[in-house]
Amino acid sequence: MSRKIRHNAMGIKLDRRNFLKGTALGLTASALPTKQADAGFLDAFFQEHFREMSKEEIEEVLTRLEKEYTEKYKKNVSVQATPHMPGVVFGYGLDLSRCIGCRRCVYACVGENNQSRDPQIHWISVLRFKKGEKWSDLEQSDKYYNPAVVPEPGYFYMPVQCQQCKNPPCVRACPTQATWKDPDGIVVVDYNWCIGCRYCMAACPYGARRFNWGAPKVPNEEFNPNTHYLGNRPRYKGVVEKCTFCVQRSRAGKYPACVEICPVGARKFGNLLDPNSEIRYSIENKRVFRLKEELNTHPKFYYFFAT
Amino acid sequence: MLKICKRIVTLIVLLTVLILSFHDVGITSEQSTDTVYPEAAKPRELDIPKYFVPPPPFTEGIFPCSECHAEMDVDTERRELGMHEEQQALKHAGPQQWCLDCHNPSDRDKLRLISGQLISFEESYLLCGQCHGTIFRDWKAGVHGKRTGEWNGKKLYRLCVHCHNPHQPAFKPLKPKQPPMRPADIR
């Protein structure tokens, strides 16, 4: 191919390739808002995919984010990127015979994971079903019930959150690979890589993913400063978020916040590969089912009846 | 000759068996003076790991029971009590149960198992487990009841009585937290 050099009025010699390069750079530069064009913004803009970054690059990103959040929330924020523990695959159990539908888990989750208060985002939905009726259809449920006390006679409750599928349809739907399944089974989202197309939300059969329609607002005093890059760090407007089994807690050996708050002890959590774990005991000794298992998603969220 | 030999051998065998059996009796009689309940009724300590249970939720000023009861005579008759409102509202196994089925009459600061073994209020799960065996099994495995702490390490267990009032064990209804906003209300 001949590289024909053109002459222009300014007398700059420019071949076709360099001209295109210049145009692209110029367009990108004009797309950057000049107000925010400090070093941090540019660093964030050119940040690599989380799984393609080296340890040092991740460290740099974490330091940058910590500084940013500490300024914003007026408290010492730590952002971790704790990797998975070897030999651990997390499983979750929920005892439907005990759940009383009190929604303590919903709000413990909101507090622990810095979910937006306005517009409101809840990772857990507690669904109410009438006893004795067809109930496998989630559309038939009510999540806005509000009696004086629970449990109400004649009803039962089923909390639904991310089922951390072994074969997650959301991961396959993501065009930018901003969401993926880590080796401990937790499906995570890199909020810096999510473009907000919401394909994953359409793909999820459990309605477990939430979209930030507006800039998320969390009051400074309620902000949980113990955060994880792939979990409860502040989200941006226009990104998708979801339950991560409290990745910042579970990878540090602690129970998720919903397990710790449950007043009836209906929620169980542990390592599926450990034969002595609570979750293995429930699976082996109780009547267990997984939600919509005919869809071949292989959830790691086990509903069971302990009675 | 052979017959005599055989007889001698059988005699020796019989004698040793007799001596051994007497020896056994000696041991058991020694034991029975130590403990009032049979060996098999003792809870198997190995089954129960060291839990990290918070202290029992006593009503303020009610423990130790001996503070009042040490001075009082034991009346084993079933009756309405003047003291202890919880007794008036005893809703546990209907009319089958009453105070001295669980509370020990001689030392009121202890609970008493069916075997006669006395246990402290910190170990009350042994008492509950006598009737609620399957629940006790689940509780030990960590499946019945609430756990906090570490999923792969130290777990904080609760006593049965932290969630179930032993005198009215049904779980008390709670006020639910507010429902989520309807999409139409989110601005």
Image: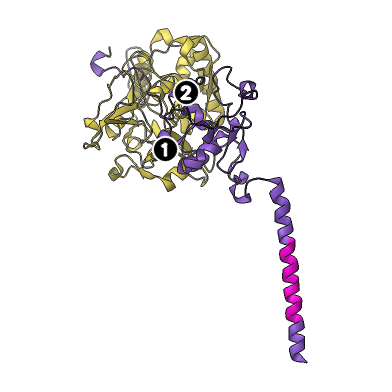
**What is the x, y in percent for residue B96?**
44, 37
Q: Residue at x 71, y 51 (%)?
A: B31
User: What residue would you read off at disc 1?
Assistant: A93
Q: Position of B134 compared to B1: left or right?
A: left
Q: Position of A18 compared to A256: left or right?
A: left
Q: Is residue B160 above or below residue A28?
A: below
Give the class, few, some or many, for how many residues have Cα within 10 Å of label 2's Cα (few <14, many ≥20). few
Q: Is residue A151 above or below residue B185?
A: below
**Res. B27 visible in picture:** yes
Looking at the rendering, which quadrant does residue B58 occupy? top right
Viewer-side residue, A26 vs A38: A38
Q: Amino acid at mark 2?
A: Glu
Determine if marks 1 and 2 fall on one subunit. no
Q: Using the image, name the chain to which the residue with label 1 belongs.
A: A
User: What residue would you read off at disc 2?
Assistant: B86
Q: Colour of chain A?
A: yellow
Instruction: Please name which of the two marks, 1 or 2, marks the residue nearer to the observer.
Output: 2
User: What secondary structure is found at the residue carrying circle 1?
Assistant: strand
Q: Is residue A204 above or below residue A107?
A: below
Q: Is residue A72 above or below residue B177?
A: above
Viewer-side residue, B64 vs A255: B64
Colour purple, chain = B
**What is the x, y in percent for residue B117?**
61, 40
User: What secondary structure is found at the residue carrying circle 2?
Assistant: helix
**What is the x, y in percent for residue B173?**
37, 23
**Magenta residue span:** B9-23
